[in-house]
Image (spheres, helix red, strand yellow):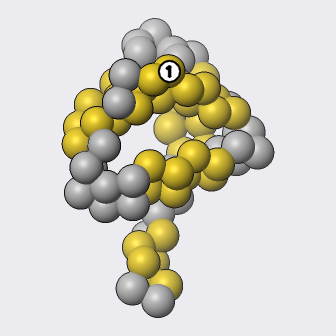
Amino acid sequence: MFTLNNFNVIFFEETKTNIVYALDDIIPYYDITFVISGSLNYIIDRKNITVKAGDVIFIKPNNHRVRLSKSNQTVKY
C-alpha cells in the first residue's frame, strides 16, 4: 500500500483453494478496483456484477458490497 495525493493505493493477489471467499460490508469510502487477472463477482446493493481482467469497478461510499471470488483461482486486483 502507498499513499498518492491523499489516496491509499493497495494491490491484492489472492489464491483460493477449495473455498469461496466472501467479503460482506458497507464501505465508508470510494472503492475503485482494477482487475489485472482472474475474475470477481460482486453484489452491490442487490445487483450482481462480474468483473474480469481489464475491468474496473467503482463503488460509492455507503453502498452495501459483497465480493466473491471462485475457489481454485488466483485473482490480482
Classify 45 as above or below 54: above
Classify 73 as above or below 25: above
Residue 23 drawn at (x, y percent): 31, 32
Residue 43 appears in which quarter of the rendering? Answer: top left
Q: Is 10 on the left-hand or right-hand side of 61?
A: right
Classify 60 as above or below 8: above
Residue 65 in sight: yes
Seen at 31% across and 55% down, the residue is: 61
Q: Is 65 on the left-hand or right-hand side of 11?
A: left
Seen at 50% across and 21% down, the residue is: 48
Which of 6/76 is in front? 6
Q: Residue furthest bottom?
A: 5
Residue 34 drawn at (x, y percent): 62, 51
Q: Which kind of residue does numbered mark 1 sit on?
A: Asn
Residue 39 drawn at (x, y percent): 63, 29
Q: How many marks?
A: 1
Classify 35 as above or below 44: below
Which of 12/25 is in front? 25
Q: Which residue is mark 1?
A: 48
Residue 74 in sight: no
Circle 1 residues within 10 Å: few <14, some 14–19, many ≥20: few
Seen at 69% across and 33% down, the residue is: 52
